[in-house]
Image: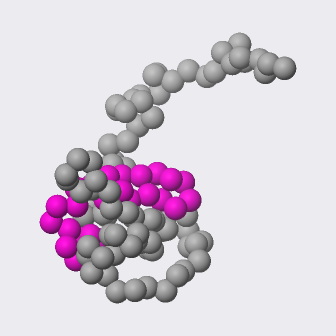
Amino acid sequence: MIFRLSQKLSDRIKAETLATLPLDENPFADWSAGLFLIGRPQYILVTNTKSLYSTVLPAKGVTDEMTFIERALSSLSASESSWTPMGRRASTKDWSPLSADQFDSPRR
């Protein structure tokens, strides 16, 4: 698994300077992570480099590489297990096929 860190996040967790790697062949193994603020608290955004699937975790307590990896994997695992397209547990009866009349025709 590849984690591409922003400079701010790399400085925070005191990560070694790593070589730039090409995209991983497995699209689920390539992730980018950055540090950002909302007010005063800091958060870490972890995003799949190919699909842009993302999760956010609090940066509090993340001060080294191992803690970052553990928290990032835990957050990804938790968000994956609770994700549904409608933001809730859905069953197949909630889905119906779309018909052509549900779309606007192109305007010229």
Determine the residue located farthest toward the right in the rendered image.
108
Q: Is residue 69 magenta?
A: yes
Q: Is residue 39 left or right of residue 73?
A: left
Residue under the point 20% across and 68% down? 62
Residue under the point 27% across and 48% down? 38
- Quarter of the image for residue 51 reads bottom right
Q: Is residue 32 left or right of residue 9?
A: right
Q: Of residues 68 and 11, which is closer to you in this image?
A: 11
Residue under the point 34% across and 31% down? 88
User: In which quadrant of the rendered image does the N terminus lie?
Assistant: bottom left
Residue bounds of the magenta highlight:
44-70
User: In which quadrant of the rendered image does the C terminus lie?
Assistant: top right
Res 99 seen here: no
Res 38 seen here: yes
- Quarter of the image for residue 50 reads bottom right
Q: How many numbered dots are placed on residues in this image?
A: 0
Q: Of residues 102 and 60, which is closer to you in this image?
A: 60
Q: Position of residue 76 (x, y in %)?
A: 34, 56
Residue under the point 59% across and 77% down? 22
- In the image, residue 84 sits, relative to residue 21, either above or below, namely above
Determine the residue located farthest toward the top in the rendered image.
101
Q: Position of residue 74 (x, y in %)?
A: 27, 60
Q: Is residue 107 left or right of residue 33?
A: right
Q: Is residue 99 magenta?
A: no
Q: Position of residue 5 (x, y in %)?
A: 40, 71
Q: Of residues 2 and 45, which is closer to you in this image?
A: 45
Identify the image's colour scheme: rainbow, by chain, secondary structure or one colour.
Answer: one colour
Determine the residue located farthest toward the left in the rendered image.
61
- In the image, residue 105 sits, relative to residue 40, either above or below, namely above
Q: Position of residue 2 (x, y in %)?
A: 45, 74
